[in-house]
Amino acid sequence: MADKIRFCIVGFGNIGRRHAEHILDNQDTTLVAVCDVNTSVQDKLPAGTLFYTDLHDMLANTETDVLCVCTPNYLHEAHTISGLEAGLHTVVEKPMAISVASCDRMIATAAKTGKSIFAVKQNRYNPPVQEVKKLMAANELGKIYMMQVNCFWNRGEAYYAGSDWRGKKEKDGGCLFTQFSHFVDILYYLNGTVISAEGLVQNFAHLHNTEVEDTGSFVLKAANNAIINFNFTTCAYERNMEGSITIFAEKGTVKIGGQYLNTIEYQQLGAATLPPINITAKANDYGLYQGSMSNHDKVIQNVVNVLYHGHAIMTSADEGREVVRIIEQMYSGATHA
Ligand SMILES: NC(=O)c1ccc[n+]([C@@H]2O[C@H](COP(=O)([O-])OP(=O)(O)OC[C@H]3O[C@@H](n4cnc5c(N)ncnc54)[C@H](O)[C@@H]3O)[C@@H](O)[C@H]2O)c1
């Protein structure tokens, strides 16, 4: 491997550009090439970066170590497999794919090629999430009784206009994959997996521009016996309102809140205390809408730490797959209201 880890990116839209920024900012990484079918994105290409419109061309004609897969959800499987088969490690944006079967094929290819898949779940790095993770890992909350996950965001006309994949059943998969998979991931990261799911979903306000639900309410049972309420909507009036997880446990109540799990909004704990955290300026801002916390610098640093320093992958392919499995379980337990 060269001194600096050499990256290439497929998909140079909102999140591909974010990957590029952080690859260029990291002293141990360099960006060699970008591929996008849309040639107009070349305007935003960093100086000195090669540009391709075909992934196989890019893989055949460049020497790189890691491929970031930043294309729409339905392409994650094919693009990750192409990268692995070309001998590259792959960083795949969330969701890892839109079916467990796709994830299984990706994992099998990683095993066959001996290359790694890094699933992007950057909200794991949010300081409030890390604080609560430590508390739960040390069993400071005791038995977990109930968790309430509220995802109340706004996705308006501009978000869907001009996109050929957002809101399309076969290409996007649904809100749990595209908007709220981070929340499913944090639920899983903190509390372990889910064994059953039942819910109602409905498309109230996006019938004209999406083929999927815009609102849902679920009751899940976790493997550790906790009851989980999971509520989501992209219909919060005019702007994102809340993205929170509240935990009711034997030894405390804690709420990770804000719009994107960026604050410790409430704590009533026995022995432990959490530092007051209120991070207000770190959402991924895409101009027309705001997403999750901007931690992609840490995603790139994790690749460096794994490849150079033997650290563990922050979110492995198996964990990325488990999030997809939980989402599949939620959709298969959902009634369309
Ligand atoms: N981690 C996060 O917080 C986060 C935030 C936003 C998006 N995402 C994920 O990143 C992915 C991309 O989202 P986005 O908002 O950047 O979408 P986008 O539509 O802005 O960008 C996707 C890009 O991929 C290109 N593309 C499509 N098909 C291609 C192909 N066959 N080969 C090469 N390029 C191709 C498109 O031309 C476009 O430029 C999605 O899976 C999304 O869920 C993750």
Image (tube, rainbow, N blue to C red):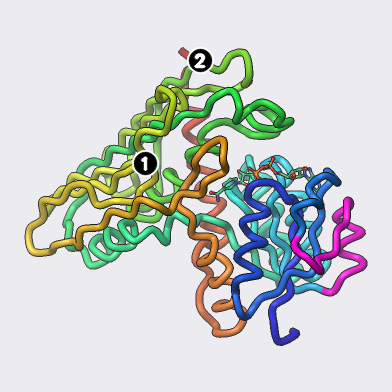
Crowding near the residue tagged with mark 2, few <14, some 14–19, many ≥20 C-alpha atoms within 10 Å: some
Q: Horizontal and vertical percent for residue 16? A: 68, 53
Q: How crowded is mark 1: few (under 14 residues within 10 Å), some or many (20 or more)?
A: many
Question: x, y percentage for residue 17?
Answer: 67, 54
* Disc 1/disc 2 C-alpha distance (Å): 21 Å
Q: Give the residues in magenta.
A: 46-63
Q: Ligand 1 closer than 8 Å to the CB at disc 1?
A: no
Residue 109 is inside the magenta segment: no
Three-letter residue code for mark 1: Gln
Contact between labelled residues 2 and 1, with CB atoms less than 8 Å apart: no
Q: Position of residue 48 (x, y in %)?
A: 81, 69
Say which quadrant the N terminus sits in. Answer: bottom right
Which numbered disc covers residue 205? Answer: 2
- Does residue 273 sit above or below 261 in this rendering? below
Q: Name the residue: 42% across, 44% down.
A: 183
Q: Which residue is drawn at 79% across and 73% down?
A: 64
Which image quadrant for residue 114? bottom right
Determine which residue is flagged by label 1.
259
Instruction: Indicate left or right for 178 with 41 as reference.
Output: left
- Looking at the rendered structure, the kind of residue marked 2 is Ala
Residue at x 35%, y 50% (from the top left corner) = 280
Q: Is residue 189 above or below residue 227?
A: below
Q: How many discs mark residues in the rendered view?
A: 2
Answer with the quadrant where ligand 1 appears in the image. top right
As drawn, the residue found furthest toward the left would be: 270
**Earlier residue among tags 1 and 2:** 2
For the point 38% across and 25% down, the residue is 217
In the image, taking residue 199 as reference, residue 59 lies left or right, namely right
